[in-house]
Amino acid sequence: MSHAITSGSFREPLISRAVQTFVSGLFSRAQPATPTRTDRLRVRAQEAEDVRDLARSVERQSPGFAADLYAAALRHEGLDD
């Protein structure tokens, strides 16, 4: 005696909505939250400060490269979102 297993769609709207809610909840938690504009500006300012630190460390050995780094840091901070 053999048994066949068939799949079908959910006929009960309550079950269907419950499954939809569960699956969408899984995906919403899996995606990282989008950073706010303030967070992006804070990160950008820290990155620019890191580049300025590098520029200060090479200023005596390579003043031209340090000037380029300072300019890059200034441009990076001024980027629009």
Image (tube, rainbow, N blue to C red):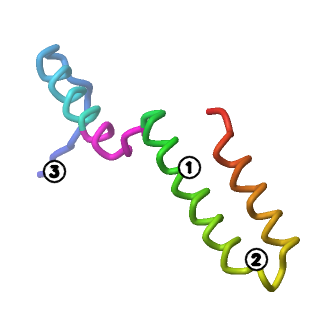
Residue 26 screen position, x and y as percent: 26, 41
Q: Which residue is mark 1?
A: 44
**Can you tell which quarter of the image residue 5 is in?**
top left
Task: Find numbered disc 1 in the image and state the secondary structure of the residue it sits on.
Answer: helix
Distance from Cα at disc 3 to Cα at disc 2: 81 Å
Distance from Cα at disc 1 to Cα at disc 3: 65 Å
* Residue depicted at x 19% and y 33%: 22
Question: Residue type at mark 3?
Answer: Ser
The magenta region covers: 26-35
Residue 53 placement, left or right of 42 = right
Q: Is residue 35 or residue 41 the one in the foreground?
A: 41
Position above or below: 51 against 58: above
Position above or below: 44 against 35: below
Question: Residue type at mark 1?
Answer: Arg
Given this view, does label 1 or label 3 mark the residue nearer the observer?
1
| Badge 2: residue crowd in 10 Å (few <14, some 14–19, many ≥20) | some
Q: Which residue is mark 2?
A: 59
Q: Which residue is mark 3?
A: 2
* Residue depicted at x 67% and y 73%: 56
Residue 30 screen position, x and y as percent: 33, 46
Task: Find numbered disc 3 in the image and state the secondary structure of the residue it sits on.
Answer: loop
Question: Residue type at mark 2?
Answer: Glu
